Image: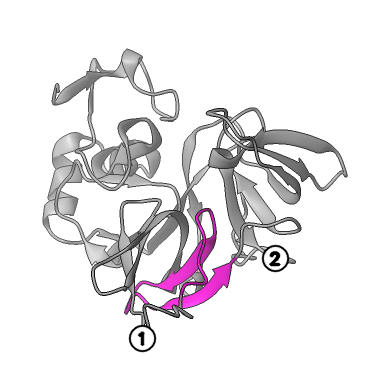
Amino acid sequence: MSRHAKRLMAPRTLQIPRKEHKFIVKPSPGPHNYETSVSILIAIRDMLGLATNAREARKIIKSGKVLVDAKVRKDHKFPIGLMDILEIPEGDVLKIVMINRKGKIVLVDISKEAARTKLYKIRNKTILKGGNLQLNLHDGTNLLIPVKDPRNPEEDIYNTRDTLVVSLANKEIEKHMKYKEGSLAYITGGSHRGEIARIKEINKIRSTIPNEVILEGNDDTAFETIEEYVFVIGEESPVLPEVVFP
């Protein structure tokens, strides 16, 4: 796999000038895939404008001034993606990574209180040896749920596509939001990406075709999308009320 990427061929999700330079810093393999992530260097230089060139951006990153999900990241190619928290304390920068209605990756302001936690979508779950439960989250993170009695796993209350609000400091689950009819969802793909809508109906399809979800927007207009694009963000209201969803 090439370590370089031409700007003209870069994913359409990136909101960058296409013709100013020939190449772009390609994100390393990591928590998010190439199509839905952006390297820290691009975020600092092109999206936040905190550096005028790659050299300045690398200097900021190598100095340990950049945090992603409360962890210092010194790799300028480290990928950031949906729901990641980007922080530069010295520059008073605190952002959450979102997808706007044009399908572009954007950095949105978030408060210090809200940035204590992160929203994770459950992609899969696995029963480990000994009966403990492992939740596989949307950014590649694995969360271990200890089970007292494997024959009667009362702790197994989580399902795929549910959303967890997890503390970044100690990785404890603060809230569990179920993927169900009536829940509030953020749409991450398709023609309605970037919108917030309420799940009206979930249609299970017994085939290789993705399950369909019917949602209702603020204007009471119903639309349809696939489960992959539905990210639960609340029940009656969003768990991040101060975040202006793009």
Q: Find residue 148 and name its label.
A: 1
Q: Label 2: how many residues lie within 10 Å, few (<14), some (14-19) or many (20+)?
A: some
Q: Give the image location of residue 146, x and y in percent.
A: 33, 79
Disc 1 on helix, strand or loop? loop
Q: Give the image location of residue 8, x and y in percent.
A: 34, 13
Q: Nearer the viewer, residue 86 or 144?
A: 144
How far apart marks 2 and 1 lie (CA) works out to 29 Å
Look at the picture and state if 141 lies above or below 77: below
Identified by mark 1, the residue type is Lys
Q: Is residue 89 left or right of residue 191?
A: left
Q: Which scheme is used to colour this image of the protein?
A: one colour
Residue at image position (53%, 53%) is: 161
Disc 2 on helix, strand or loop? loop
Q: Over which residues does the magenta segment extend?
A: 156-177
In this rendering, does residue 135 appear at all? yes
Q: Is residue 41 left or right of residue 98?
A: left
Which residue in the protein does label 2 denote?
A: 235
Q: Find residue 28 and name its label.
A: none
Counting residues from the N terminus, which is met first, the one under dot 2 or under dot 1?
Answer: 1
Look at the picture and state if 22 lies above or below 101: above
Q: Nearer the viewer, residue 47 or 98?
A: 98
In this rendering, does residue 19 appear at all? no
Quarter-of-image position of residue 136? bottom left
